[in-house]
Structures are given as C-alpha cells and as structure tokens.
C-alpha cells in the first residue's frame, strides 16, 4: 500500500513538473490535473514493485530529502568541477598511471552503495568498475594512482575525495 | 550586451570547451577505461553547462516577457540535464563492468585488484 | 543572440562527427559502445539548444525521451557484452 502511494505520488509530481505553465490554477489547467491523477494511479498500480524493491522507506524522511537537495548542487558539484579540470589536464598532458584498486566503502545499504558508486564515477580520476556484494567493497579504476598505493590491499573511500567528505554526506542521506 | 547575455555566452563556451576535451580524450587515450574517464566526466559536465545556458535564457525571458512558454522551456531543459547526468553515470558503470567481465584488461595498469578477486 | 546558439549546435555536430571516428576505428566492442554513448549525449545537448533556436519546447521533450531510450539501449548493449543476456 505504501509502495503504491509513493510510486503514484512520484508519478504525479513528475507529471506536474512536465506540464507546468499550461493553465490558470496555479500553473496548471483543470484537464491536465485530472489526467495527471488518473495516470498517476495507473502508474502506481503497474510499477509499485519496481520503484520500491526493498521494504525500507528511509528516503521518505523529509530531512534526508532536504540533505539530498543540498548535496547535489553543493559538495557534489564542487567535486564534479574539480574532476573535469583534472580530466582536462590529463587529456592535454597524457600523464596517466592507471590501475584498478579495491576501496572499502563502509556503507551497508544498497541505496548508499548506489549513490557512492555514481558519485565516484563523476568525481576526480575515478570510475567504478565492480562491486563485491558480500563485503560491499567497490573496485575503482583510478587514472592516476599515487606512489605506493598499488601495494596496499584496501583503500578507504574518504581518501578518494580531496575537498569534501562525500562518503560522510552519503551516510547521512542513505543510512 | 547585458549581464544575462554574458552569463549565457560563458555557459555555452564552457560547455563547448569541455565537450571538445571529452571527444579529444576519446580519440587520444590508449585504452577503454581511460577513454571512459574522458567521455563520462567531460561530456556530462559540458552538456550540463549548455543546458544551463538554456535554463538561464528561459528564466530571463520568462521574467522579462511573462510568457509561460519560456518557463516550460527552462523546466524541461532542467529535467533533460538531470536525466543526462544520472543515466551517464549508470551506463558508464554498466559498460565498464561488462568490459571487465568479457576479459578486456586495462593497459599500462600498475595494479588490478578486480582480476585478483575473481568475482 | 540566436547566432551563438546556432554556432554552438554546429560545434556539437562537428564533435559528433569526430566521435564517429572512434565508432569506426574502435578495436573492441565496448569502445564502440562508449563512442555511441558520447554521440547520444551530444545529440541530447544539441536538441536542447535547437529548442531555443526554433522556439519549440517539443525539441526538449524529444530530448528527454531520447535520453531515456538511449540509456536503456546502452544497458542492454552492456549486458550483451558482459555475456549476461
């Protein structure tokens, strides 16, 4: 039941965003609102088992959603900018020292691992290649491994990020 | 030229520069994984900035002319950019994992822990 | 004002042609897959800009749908390459 409500609510929100500016009730016209409610109920009936696979609804907490809205344009965007300057430097100079290392994430939930893997892919010099599903360790292709790091068995995830501690943010949002 | 126009030109220029760097990296880097570094990061960032130019244009036209068509343009451009950033990261991870499973080794690599782990 | 948008779209088109070089050369299948992914990303960026050039919001809607469909196709190509299909 709660999965149905969450899915239908998300679908209705998406419909409202896509049709903003169509009429006079707020930004919407009456026909768009009625159609949106009908389509949201239909979507919720069909897709409730796809959107909410695990039975935890941690992200419904408004404080976590607010943190997520701060996280994406704030710390994440800072690291994204730094990553692109780094890639620009490597494209021009071709100074690379690549390798695949094992990174200890310290996160327990699937959502946390998912967010960390995606954040790693878009942050400086790193690209997530694989996941060890028993220990939740990530395998990271690093374009420029520091001297001596290739001999270490496991690297902590906080060492990958220079300016902002992204794993701590993800732990606050997802766990 | 107003401040908004300068902002739009700057966003377009940054977008084109980073897209160009991404494509140059795609052509220049020696192996698959390093090419993916160039394409996923640089083209995502460049496309976000060209979309940002469209969002700034739409919002400025909406506030100066009060035509709701421009608000729709800005919102839809924002949604497209969000989709792009999210889907690029996921598909990059999918292709990297598939390539490693199919037996493509990273060239010039100093260490390969995934090969040792044998998942 | 419009000229800058058209110039940007032209630049993106040239970049698409350049990534096609990797699509043809690419020694392995994943190389071709990421070249295709790059072309898709640039197409979406160009479509958003064309929405401003022609003053039609429908271009941006098409860009959203194109992006989601190309995401699904890339995932399936990845599954095929990894031998999980």
Image: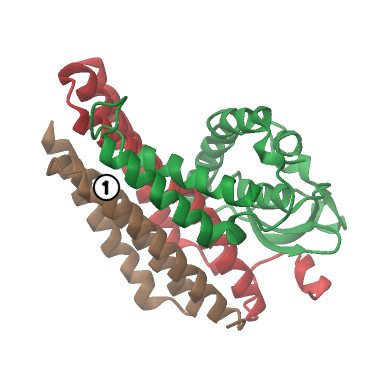
Chain colours: A green, B red, C brown
Residue at the image position 59 percent from the left and 74 percent from the top? B99
Q: Position of residue C83 (x, y in %)?
A: 60, 83
Residue at the spot of label 1:
C60
The answer to whether residue B47 shows anywhere in this view is no
User: How crowded is the residue under tag 1: few (<14 C-alpha within 10 Å), some, or many (20+)?
Assistant: many
**Quick one: SS at disc 1?**
helix
Left or right of residue C59: residue A79 = right
* Vertical relation: B67 (above or below) A141: above
Of residues B12 and A175, the one drawn nearer to the viewer in this rendering: A175
How many numbered tags mark residues here? Answer: 1
Query: Splitting the image into 4 quarters, where does residue A32 fall?
Result: top left
Q: Position of residue A33 (x, y in %)?
A: 34, 39
Q: Position of residue B56 (x, y in %)?
A: 30, 28
Residue at the image position 37 percent from the left and 45 percent from the top? A36
Residue at the image position 71 percent from the left and 33 percent from the top? A169
Of residues A69 and B46, the one drawn nearer to the viewer in this rendering: A69
Q: Position of residue B71 (x, y in %)?
A: 26, 30
């Amino acid at each position: 039941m709660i999965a149905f409500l969450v899915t239908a609510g998300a679908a209705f929100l998406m419909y409202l965003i896509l049709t903003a500016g169509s009429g006079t009730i707020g930004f919407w016209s009456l026909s768009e609102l009625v159609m949106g409610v009908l389509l949201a109920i239909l979507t919720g009936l069909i897709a409730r088992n796809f959107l909410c696979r695990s039975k935890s609804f941690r992200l419904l907490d408004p404080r976590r959603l607010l943190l997520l809205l701060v996280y994406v344009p704030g710390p994440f965007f800072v690291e994204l900018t730094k990553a692109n300057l780094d890639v620009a430097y490597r494209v021009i100079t071709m100074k690379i020292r690549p390798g695949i290392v094992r990174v200890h994430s310290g996160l327990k939930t699937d959502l946390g691992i998912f967010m960390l893997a995606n954040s790693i892919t878009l942050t400086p010099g790193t690209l997530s290649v694989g996941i060890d599903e028993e220990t939740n360790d990530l395998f990271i292709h690093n374009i420029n491994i520091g001297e001596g790091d290739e001999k270490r068995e496991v690297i902590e995830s906080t060492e990958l990020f220079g300016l902002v501690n992204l794993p701590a943010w993800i732990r606050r949002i997802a766990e | 030229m107003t401040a908004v126009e300068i902002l739009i030109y700057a966003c377009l220029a940054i977008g084109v520069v980073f897209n160009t760097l991404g494509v140059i990296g795609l052509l220049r880097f020696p192996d698959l994984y390093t090419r993916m570094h160039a394409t996923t990061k640089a083209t995502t960032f460049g496309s976000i900035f060209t979309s940002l130019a469209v969002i700034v244009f739409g919002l400025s036209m909406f506030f100066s002319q009060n035509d709701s068509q421009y608000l729709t343009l800005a919102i839809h451009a924002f949604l497209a950019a969000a989709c792009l950033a999210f889907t690029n990261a996921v598909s990059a991870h999918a292709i990297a994992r598939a390539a490693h499973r199919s037996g493509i080794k990273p060239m010039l690599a100093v260490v390969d822990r995934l090969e040792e782990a044998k998942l | 004002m419009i000229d800058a948008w058209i110039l940007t779209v032209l630049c993106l088109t040239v970049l698409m042609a350049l990534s096609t070089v990797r699509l043809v050369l690419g020694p392995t299948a994943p190389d071709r897959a990421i070249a295709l992914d790059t072309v898709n990303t640039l197409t979406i960026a160009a479509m958003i800009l064309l929405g401003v050039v022609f003053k039609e919001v429908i271009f941006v809607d098409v860009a959203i749908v194109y992006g989601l469909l190309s995401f699904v196709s890339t995932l399936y190509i990845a599954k095929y390459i990894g031998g999980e299909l």
